[in-house]
Image (cartoon, grey):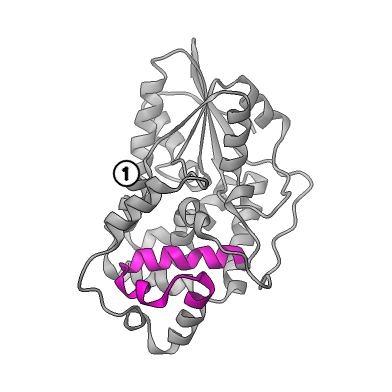
Amino acid sequence: MLATFKRYLAPLAALFAVPAAVSAAPAPASVETAKPALWEVSDPDTTIYLFGTIHLLPENYAWRTKAIDTAISRSESLVVETIVDDKNPKELIEAMTRLGYSPGQLPLAERVPAEKRQMLETAIAKTGIPRPIFDKMETWVAAFSLLGVQFADIGVKGQHGVEQTLRDAFGTAGKTIGQLETNAEQLSFFDTLPEQAQRELLEGAIEAPEKMGADFTAMLRSWARGDVDAIAKTFNSELGSSPAIRDALLVRRNANWSQWVEQRLAKPGTVLVAVGAGHLAGPDSVQDLLQREGYKVRRLQ
């Protein structure tokens, strides 16, 4: 389940990526014909594009196609999962401080198996955060902070990810940018995870970068092909072992977002909704929920 957690934390943890001295695993090369999946749901006066994204990418990874550029140009507004302001992260920091620190925490080293404690200390040293602070963190926040180091180690960054590119394009054009969840709402999904699940996430945050690089490559390739079956497998399959976590990270959020789409269809206009590709693949995807309610969802790419 470690890879799944990392994928769902990516939009926020990317903000804490620090420059790595040496890239421990090469970033995957771009493919010549990347065609990530894109859908449309509409009525006579409203069009909503649904674009499954990948939150972090290597530099200069080519993914914009004619269909995606058309959706961007026609849309009057962009809606993403949550807006992470890397220039002014006050909202994120305040939410993390409020949710992620509580008295009575075990020393962080005692929250991982003994054989992994040296790996933990090595990862902590890379962050530049004073060591005593980690012992005050709830486990998910410690994992969150350490994942930023992993992302840097494999050469992928939030500023190269799809959401940031879209936000730049819409911002330059003077178009509205909105969010489906606040930073605090998104963090709360992880804050309420069982402690054992948080510890699994922490272990994943200190595993060898080569392992994370392999996981990321598989995810990136399925996304670039627009292969929703493979996306469902590489993004979501691990959630099956924990119904409670699947419900928290995927099912309830997809239900909320499909309801948002239904409500937005009541207003005229054109909107591009860009969310993690795992939310638009497999059973209980946003499109699946919309189709159950009688809406026609058409795949454009």
Q: Is residue 143 visible?
A: yes
Q: Is residue 13 left or right of residue 152?
A: left
Please, what is the three-letter code of the amino acid marked with disc 1? Arg
Q: Residue furthest top?
A: 44
Q: Residue furthest right?
A: 32
Vertical side of 172 occupied by 216: above or below: below
Q: Position of residue 76 (x, y in %)?
A: 55, 20
Determine which quarter of the picture holds residue 138.
bottom left
Exactly how many numbered labels are in the figure? 1
Is residue 289 on the magenta stretch?
no
* Quadrant where the image shows the C terminus: top right
Vertical side of 57 occupied by 82: above or below: above
Vertical side of 249 occupied by 293: above or below: above
Q: Which residue is mark 1?
A: 252
* Residue under the image location 41 percent in, 14 percent down: 267
Relative depth, front residue between 280 and 13: 13
Q: Position of residue 3 (x, y in %)?
A: 49, 64
Relative depth, front residue between 131 and 30: 131
Q: Residue furthest bottom?
A: 115
Relative depth, front residue between 15 and 223: 15
Vertical side of 5 occupied by 158: above or below: above
Relative depth, front residue between 24 and 17: 17
Q: Which residues are magenta?
A: 123-152
Q: Is residue 243 visible?
A: no
- For the stretch drawn in magenta, the main secondary structure is helix
Q: Position of residue 108 (x, y in %)?
A: 34, 78
Q: Position of residue 292 (x, y in %)?
A: 38, 31
Secondary structure of residue under mark 1: helix
Q: Is residue 91 left or right of residue 228?
A: left
Is residue 141 on the magenta stretch?
yes
The local crowd at label 1, few if under 14, some if 14 to 19, many if 20 or more residues have their Cα within 10 Å, is few
